[in-house]
Image (tube, grey):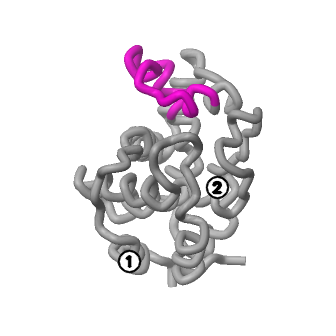
């Protein structure tokens, strides 16, 4: 079953006020901040929508607040894809699918990156397979959309500011509508 843009709005309206895994923002604030950071960086419409929707799997596969603290990896990077595949191209879907592996890669290639991770991101990193070794990092970087996923990961990491002001959800859903398939 495909999610319509109205369905996506409904998910955010219904569950967006949930805390974002031990961070000082809600699921909706995190999504809007990620999209806002992408837009401010001059990212493509597809990357901006990927930033908005990268954690939609948390809303579709609810495991309660901070599942990583209970040893749960909810596989959110995959969970939303079947619902989004009929609606968006790979330019949106692949950065979403790859954003967890982008964290694993960044920890391997950027010595300062791991130290910037929040406590929950460090906890979830272990559950998600840990830091890539050099070969895994090279293989990841060779994938299509790896660079978009790395950019998304960095926006994701910075989208945890309880005071940050963003455009409303409707602004980003309009962008999503402009790139939606058929």
Give the x, y percent position of residue 55.
56, 54
Q: Name the residue under label 2.
A: 58
Residues 93 and 59: in front is 59
Q: Residue 109: image x %, image y %? A: 44, 19
Q: Which of the pair 101/118 is nearer the observer?
A: 118
**Are discs 2 and 1 less than 8 Å apart at CB?**
no
Rendered-image quadrant of the N terminus: bottom right
Q: Which of 151 and 125 is in front in this view?
A: 125
Give the label on residue 170, or none.
1
The spot of residue 12 in percent (x, y) is 54, 69
The residue tagged with tag 1: helix, strand or loop? helix
Badge 1 crowding class, 10 Å Cα cut-off, few under 14, some 14 to 19, many 20 or more, is: few
Residue that appears at 72% across and 46% down:
74
Picture layout, residue 137 above or below residue 30: above
**Res 31 label:** none
Rendered residue at 59%/22% (across/down): 132
Give 81 or 114, whichever is nearer the viewer: 114
Q: Is 61 covered by the magenta stretch? A: no
Residues in magenta, as a range? 103-123
Element class at badge 2: helix
**In the image, residue 86 above or below residue 143:** below
Task: State which tag comes first along the sequence, 2 or 1.
Answer: 2
Q: Residue at x 72, y 40 (%)?
A: 73
């Amino acid at each position: 079953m495909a999610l319509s843009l109205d369905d996506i709005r409904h998910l955010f309206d219904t569950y967006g006020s949930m805390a974002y895994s031990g961070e000082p923002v809600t699921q909706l604030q995190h999504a809007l901040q990620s999209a806002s950071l992408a837009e401010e960086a001059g990212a493509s419409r597809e990357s901006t929508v990927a930033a908005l929707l990268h954690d939609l799997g948390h809303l579709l596969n609810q495991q309660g607040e901070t599942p990583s603290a209970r040893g749960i990896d909810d596989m959110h990077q995959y969970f939303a894809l079947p619902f989004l595949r009929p609606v968006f191209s790979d330019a949106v879907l692949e950065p979403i699918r790859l954003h967890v592996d982008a964290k694993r890669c960044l920890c391997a290639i950027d010595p300062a990156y791991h130290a910037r991770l929040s406590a929950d991101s460090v906890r979830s990193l272990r559950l998600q397979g840990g830091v890539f070794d050099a070969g895994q990092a090279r293989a990841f970087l060779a994938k299509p959309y790896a660079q978009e996923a790395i950019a998304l990961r960095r926006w994701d990491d910075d989208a945890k500011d309880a005071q940050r002001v963003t455009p409303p959800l409707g602004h980003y859903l309009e962008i999503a509508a402009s790139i939606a398939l058929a």
